[in-house]
């Protein structure tokens, strides 16, 4: 890859030029930013387990099962308090715009 500013050869996936420090056009970000949020689509009560499943890239049913086992083995009261705190603290993920709009119906 050639730097667009100083015209020197740099590595193909570089975000910045090694020589002049200029940001390269079309360079991909180093990593995407993930936020821990309550799920807007995969929820039973508040979307806490669905959001945890999306964040850790796990099946939400498995997260729910683990949550129930932790609550049963550590006592019901602390598990409910942690769930309620997570409900208050975690923001809800925005709804997908395309999923919330009904599909257009063809005219007969």
Image (cartoon, grey):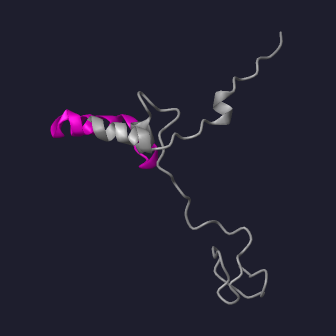
Looking at the image, which residue sits at the far right? 107
Q: Residue at x 52, y 39 (%)?
A: 92
Image-based side of 88 in relation to 30, left or right? left
Q: Is residue 13 magenta?
A: no
Q: Answer with the quarter of the image where residue 60 lies.
A: top left
Q: Residue at x 68, y 33 (%)?
A: 98
Residue 50 pos. (x, y %):
43, 37
- Front one among 106 and 67: 67
Above or below for 34 versus 104: below
Residue 90 pos. (x, y %):
45, 44
Q: Residue at x 59, y 39 (%)?
A: 94
Q: Give the prevailing secondary structure in the magenta stretch.
A: helix
- Residue 63 visible to an observer of this rendering: no
Image-based side of 98 in relation to 53, left or right? right
Image-based side of 17 in relation to 54, left or right? right
- Front one among 4 and 77: 77
Look at the image and give the residue range highlighted in magenta.
Answer: 53-79
- Quadrant (top left, top right, bottom left, bottom right) of the C terminus: top right
Q: Is residue 55 magenta?
A: yes
Image-based side of 28 in relation to 35, left or right? right
Q: Answer with the quarter of the image where residue 8 lies.
A: bottom right
- Quadrant (top left, top right, bottom left, bottom right) of the N terminus: bottom right
Looking at the image, which residue sits at the far top? 108
Q: Answer with the quarter of the image where residue 6 lies.
A: bottom right
- Residue 41 visible to an observer of this rendering: yes
Above or below for 107 versus 59: above
Q: Residue at x 74, y 81 (%)?
A: 2
- Counting every numbered tag in the picture gives 0
């Amino acid at each position: 890859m050639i730097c667009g500013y100083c015209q020197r050869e740099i590595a193909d996936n570089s975000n910045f030029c090694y020589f002049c420090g200029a940001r390269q056009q079309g360079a991909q970000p180093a990593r995407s930013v993930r936020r821990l949020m309550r799920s807007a689509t995969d929820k039973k009560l508040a979307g806490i387990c669905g959001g945890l499943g999306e964040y850790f890239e796990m099946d939400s049913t498995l997260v729910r099962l683990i949550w129930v086992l932790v609550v049963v083995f550590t006592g019901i009261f602390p598990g409910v308090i942690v769930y309620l705190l997570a409900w208050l603290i975690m923001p809800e993920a925005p709804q997908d715009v395309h999923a919330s709009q009904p599909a257009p119906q063809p005219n007969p």
